[in-house]
Image (cartoon, rainbow, N blue to C red):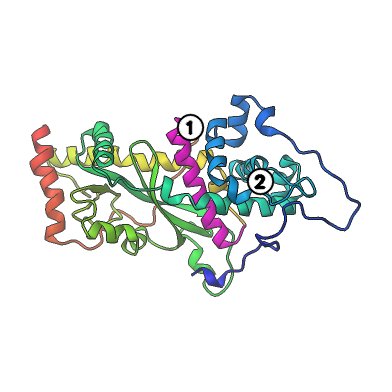
């Protein structure tokens, strides 16, 4: 998909960050934002605590460290803060550059470089539970919400606004609400951490189509997670490993099942709210090249998880982020007896006993 879209940056990754221009040379004073702000104001401006920023810096410093100090090269810390400020406010490069005390073209190079570096941490910070202890802890977290057993994650999709990528397939990126977007699939755990993410599908893609073509589905089909379950909305077809709610619950057991499923699944909606509130660029939209937008989405997911690990959750009830679904209640996907048997067993063998 991505090969049809040109990278909109004019500067390559190999350019020096302190690039010279044809004008009288001046050295702009660099702001020291890490030290200048107290903890509260720092968090408000960069959306992460100083502790989390230091964690990230230690992980990517070697990748973004300038090879020389020629022309007073920008420190790794200031590079990271410029990128964080961009993710936090969604301002164009000129604003990010002014905030960091650098030219807007240099800010663009920095944002791309830092984003690429953080995105390489994906496997370390975005992963489903695999060890017995991780599985047990995850399932207990979900069970404590509304007594739904065996849950490893809640799955859903959300739209991230982009500019038209151009070309013959541009209209594929126009979603049902009429704007251009990527439809991003996310699995979240009970702590609102993102444990799986797919950020490459055009906005017109249906949630069920994205899942059907995902590596996650292959892993679930192969039995990697044994009897672990995902909870999804009614846009997903029922599978032995993916449980949507009933469209028309009838008896008390079915109503209790639906209530528990919906309350437990709600963690992914809350995750979208916290994630997008922390990094408003996900809601405001991005004008960068498609590959860079995809990297920014993954990068902000990694940063969100680091913040969660350090107990830095934002309250998501101050700003409601609408969850945009592609599929209605009447789209149930493929259904076979074996798949439906798992949901029926949950309803009539488990939830019925809770009445």
Q: Give the mark, 2 or 1, whose residue is nearer the N terminus.
A: 2
Q: Which residues are magenta?
A: 288-315
Q: Is residue 81 above or below residue 325?
A: above
Q: Is residue 32 left or right of residue 147?
A: right
Q: Residue at x 27, y 44 (%)?
A: 131
Q: Residue at x 66, y 46 (%)?
A: 91
Secondary structure of residue under mark 1 = loop
Magenta region includes residue 308: yes
Q: CA distance from mark 2 to mark 1?
A: 21 Å
Whether residue 113 is visible, yes or no, is: yes
Pinpoint residue 337: horizontal percent, then vertical percent: 12, 60
Q: Which residue is mark 1?
A: 314
Pinpoint residue 95: horizontal percent, then vertical percent: 71, 45
Q: Is residue 74 left or right of residue 348?
A: right
Quarter of the image where the C terminus is located: top left
Q: Which residue is mark 2?
A: 91
Q: Residue at x 28, y 52 (%)?
A: 234
Pinpoint residue 55: horizontal percent, then vertical percent: 52, 37
View extreme (right): residue: 24
Q: Callout 2 environment at 10 Å: few (<14), some (14 to 19), or many (20+)?
A: some
- Viewer-nearest residue: 14 or 289: 14
View extreme (bottom): residue: 168
Q: Residue at x 62, y 30 (%)?
A: 42
Magenta region includes residue 156: no
Q: Are marks 2 and 1 in contact (CB under 8 Å)?
A: no
């Amino acid at each position: 998909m991505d090969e049809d879209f040109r990278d909109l940056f004019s500067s390559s990754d190999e350019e020096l960050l302190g690039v010279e221009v044809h004008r009288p040379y001046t050295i702009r004073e660099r702001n020291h934002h890490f030290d200048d702000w107290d903890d509260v104001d720092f968090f408000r401006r960069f959306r992460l605590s100083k502790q989390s920023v230091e964690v990230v810096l230690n992980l990517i410093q070697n990748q973004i460290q300038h090879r020389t100090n020629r022309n007073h090269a920008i420190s790794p810390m200031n590079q990271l803060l410029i990128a964080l400020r961009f993710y936090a406010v969604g301002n164009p490069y000129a604003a990010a550059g002014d905030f960091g005390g650098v030219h807007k073209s240099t800010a663009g190079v920095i944002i791309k470089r830092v984003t690429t570096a953080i995105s390489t941490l994906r496997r370390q910070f975005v992963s489903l539970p695999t060890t017995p202890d991780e599985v047990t802890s995850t399932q207990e977290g979900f069970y404590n919400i509304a007594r739904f057993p065996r849950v490893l994650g809640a799955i859903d999709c959300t739209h991230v606004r982009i500019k038209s990528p151009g070309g013959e397939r541009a209209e594929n990126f126009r979603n049902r609400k009429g704007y251009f977007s990527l439809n991003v699939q996310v699995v979240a755990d009970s702590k609102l951490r993102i444990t799986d993410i797919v950020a490459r599908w055009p906005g017109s893609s249906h949630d069920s189509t994205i899942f059907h073509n995902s590596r996650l589905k292959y892993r679930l089909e192969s039995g990697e997670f044994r009897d672990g379950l995902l909870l999804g909305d009614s846009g997903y077809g029922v599978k032995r490993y993916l449980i949507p709610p009933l469209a028309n619950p009838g008896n008390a057991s079915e109503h209790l099942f639906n209530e528990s499923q919906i309350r437990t699944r709600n963690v992914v909606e809350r995750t979208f709210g916290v994630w997008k509130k922390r990094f408003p660029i996900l809601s405001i939209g991005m004008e960068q090249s498609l590959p860079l937008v995809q990297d920014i989405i993954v990068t902000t997911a990694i940063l969100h998880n680091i913040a969660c690990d350090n107990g830095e959750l934002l309250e998501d009830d101050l700003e409601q982020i609408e969850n945009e679904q592609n599929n209605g209640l009447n789209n149930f996907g493929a259904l076979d007896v074996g798949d439906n048997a798992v949901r029926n067993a949950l309803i009539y063998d488990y939830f019925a006993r809770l009445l």
